[in-house]
Image (spheres, coloured by chain):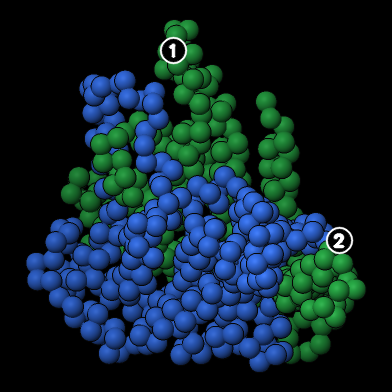
Amino acid sequence: MTASVAPPDPLDSAPAWHVGLAAHPGRVIAWTLLVIGGIVMMTPLIYMVATSLKLSNEVYDVNIIPREPTLENYKFIFENTRFGLWFLNSLVTSVLVTISVVFFDSLIGYTLAKFKFRGRDAVFVAMLTTLMIPTEMLIVPWYLMAKNLGWLNSYWGIMFPGMMTGFGVFLMRQFFTGIPDDYIHAARIDGLSEFQIWWQVALPLVTPALSALAIFTFLGNWTAFLWPLIVTNDRGLYTLPVGLASFSGEYLTEWELIMAGATIATLPTLAVFIVFQRFIIRGVVLAGLKG
Amino acid sequence: MWRRDSLTIETKLAIRAWLFLAVPIVFFVVIRFYPALQSFGIAFTEWNLLSPARFVGLANFSRMLGDPVFWIAFKNTFLYLFIGTPLSLALAFLIAYYLDQVRFGHGLIRALYFIPHLTTTVAMAWVWRWFYQPPPIGLFNNLLNLADLNAQPFLRSTVQALPAAIAPAIWAGLGFQVILFMAGLRAIPSSYYEAARIDGAGRWMILREITLPMLRPTTVFLVVISSIGFLRIFDTVYNMTDNGAGGPLNSTKPLVLYIYETAFRSYQMGYAAAQTLILFLILLTISLVQLRLMRARP
């Protein structure tokens, strides 16, 4: 995915009624306050990264810039803990769940938007209803299910609750509804199978929604804590957030190590933001307005 | 293909549709609906996973009524909601209102506010936990010290700990709310503002009579999303308190954390399920209120 296919930023251009107003003192003050506020917003992240590069004798120094920047904390973490493995566990489970959600939610959304059959609305309403069921209400039954079926301490155990989502179905159905039926009829006449029509004709038309769904599913699973905490107690199968929580509890006073661990857990989400910024901002707006 | 000509196109398409939906329907039934119903059943049992579940009627619910820790967690949950939601929405609106008028560096400033929304909650809870440490460790106390102010106990105080735990939650949610408020502001037709200005309306008048009423759908949506978020708070509190216990003295313990402890630290599955039903009812009420408010357009 290159930047050139990025959708236009819905918040990029200021509306016309702003244009007539030139810079006056009030606006300069507002701008300055906004920038200061923005920097304050970033301080936890800045301190996190800065402290992860400090030696332990410097940790309590208010100065941000480390006097002697060091990668010792990262070295320690990778040599003495299982952060590498936890990173891998998080990556594999998040990616697999994302693939599943993107595939199934878009297939379901397409079917519910573009096929006419009896019972369609009932299926849609039923899937929407699942949005009302909070995860917390399901964790006890899920735990029992995982325990009985031997899914505790396995990738599948971490992943199975999230393989499809009511939200994704809703989002994708909204977008597929906007595709003209003519495209689908034309493809049918060309002799494409229904699966091919979905895959080759319809899916490429909803790429922005699809990428937004993929990004949010990935981030949601990467940061997920409660369920992975419950379903894993074998340290080798922890995801990064669970591993970080356990590691931090163990090295409670060694904040430079904890900050290095926190940085490792956070950097991938920031990387995702930098690469997909436009999709993300647009996706938030789309999901918010459609939801 | 010709062999199946006896079926009409409609029937063929319907068969195809059900074929596409087969696996998803199984998933939603087995992983969503069945467990949801099951938790209703478990809520009426006593079950420690070692011996078989025993039906106890409403015992779990009457136990809840007399359980002081449950009520503390219940109260805390609503404290999170009633402090967190108004504060974060007011801040988000203020930022969005001014950021919307900024063109110079708009994208960059917006990113500064939005990035915290994408961070890993657990990691950030630990960063904030460090900030709150007593002197000479924590950043906040070191800053207070530089300003010649008294050190504060923050997470070690039963009074300050809960607000201290709300701060990172507000911080992380702000960017999302700012983005949605700005999208809502942009959706207001500029002709409304022009007309108001021609009529000689001042800034306050425009804000009160046009901007805020037109933003109502966005505001309702954000109030609900934010409320649900605070009612379900867990990651932050678990990671900011000693042994994830919601201390000191349960002063920060939210409902979800108590549910977690009941189910997975003391293995009282029935009692935990009963508590999740209460949480479910609270969340359901909020969702229904939202539907109500969204329909009743002014």
Residue B66, can we see it?
no
Answer with left or right where residue A43 lies relative to residue A9: left
Dot 2: element = loop
Chain coloured green here: B
Q: Subunit of mark 2? A: A
Give the residue drawn at x 24%, y 45%. B149
Q: Subunit of mark 1? A: B
Q: Residue furthest top?
A: B199
The N terminus of chain B - image quarter: bottom right
Colour displayed for chain A in the image of the structure: blue
Q: How many marks?
A: 2
Residue B197, disc = 1
- Circle 1 packing at 10 Å, graded few (<14), some (14-19), many (20+), is some
Q: Residue B100: horizontal and vertical position, in percent?
A: 38, 34
Q: Residue A61: horizontal and vertical position, in percent?
A: 17, 62
Frontmost residue, B223 versus B185 = B185
Answer above or below: position of B286 versus A114. Answer: above
- Circle 2 packing at 10 Å, graded few (<14), some (14-19), many (20+), is few
Q: Residue furthest right?
A: B6
Q: Determine which residue is flagged by label 2.
A: A118
